[in-house]
Image (cartoon, helix red, strand yellow):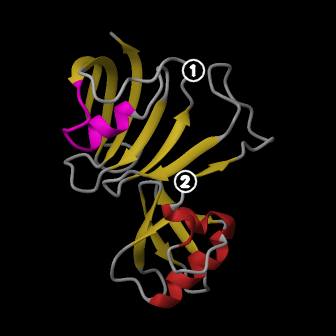
Amino acid sequence: MSDRLVGLFWGRNTFTDGRGGFYYKAQEQQMAIRPEHYGDIRLAANVTDDLRQLTAAAAGGGNGVGATLRQRKEGSSSSQQQPANRSSVGRRTGTSRYGYPYQVVEEGTGRRPKAGTLNLLKFDRIGWSDAFDGQSKAYDLLGVVRRVSGRAGWLDEALLSMKEGEVRNVTVPDEYAPYVELRLISIE
């Protein structure tokens, strides 16, 4: 069971280490995942029940799914100094109704689009094929202006749930570039 691909940890392939732990690779180096972050691992469908129980127990859940499907807030580390434009409330994570995991990298402070109306939104959309902030950027669409109604899939859903200024990472496995960063600039 050692060094077996078991899922994703914030957009990076996750492996078992053969000793009951998990790791991901960053620039060809193995980076251990701390047990308190096991709940953030998105396990593949073919993963055995013992691994599901391990991640669920570390995340504080007992149903085999753990905290991965529950929206939660993670506190900021006091050892990490945040830039002045970053919110100090920590990173919020969750799963969209389409089943795609997301992480709010920067909280927005502006207005939120109104559901049920044809909102004209200005946003940035960056996609990577390997990982968030990875080496393989697939596209970099800056200043896109588009009407959003909430009926056109995961992108509309994500944009309608954001506030102006928010930056969000969304993992969309069935996209050409599955690691997408969205920044809602303004509501026009």
Q: 52 or 160, which is in the foreground?
A: 160
Q: Which residue is mark 2?
A: 71
Q: Which residue is mark 1?
A: 109
Residue drawn 39% across the image and 23% down it: 113
Relative placement, left or right, of 165 versus 58 is left
Tell me which amino acid carries mark 2: Gln
Does the magenta segment cover residue 156?
Answer: yes
Label 1: few (<14), some or many (≥20) within 10 Å?
Answer: few
> Is tag 2's residue or tag 1's residue first in the polypeptide sequence?
2
Q: As displayed, is residue 26 above or below residue 46?
A: above
Looking at the rendered structure, the secondary structure element under dot 1 is loop
Magenta span of residues:
148-160
Residue drawn 50% across the image and 45% down it: 103
- Using the rendered image of the protein, determine whether residue 29 is visible from the camera's viewpoint: no
Q: CA distance from mark 2 to mark 1?
A: 20 Å
Q: Dividing the picture into quarters, in which one does residue 136 lie?
A: top left
Q: 3 or 37, which is in the foreground?
A: 37
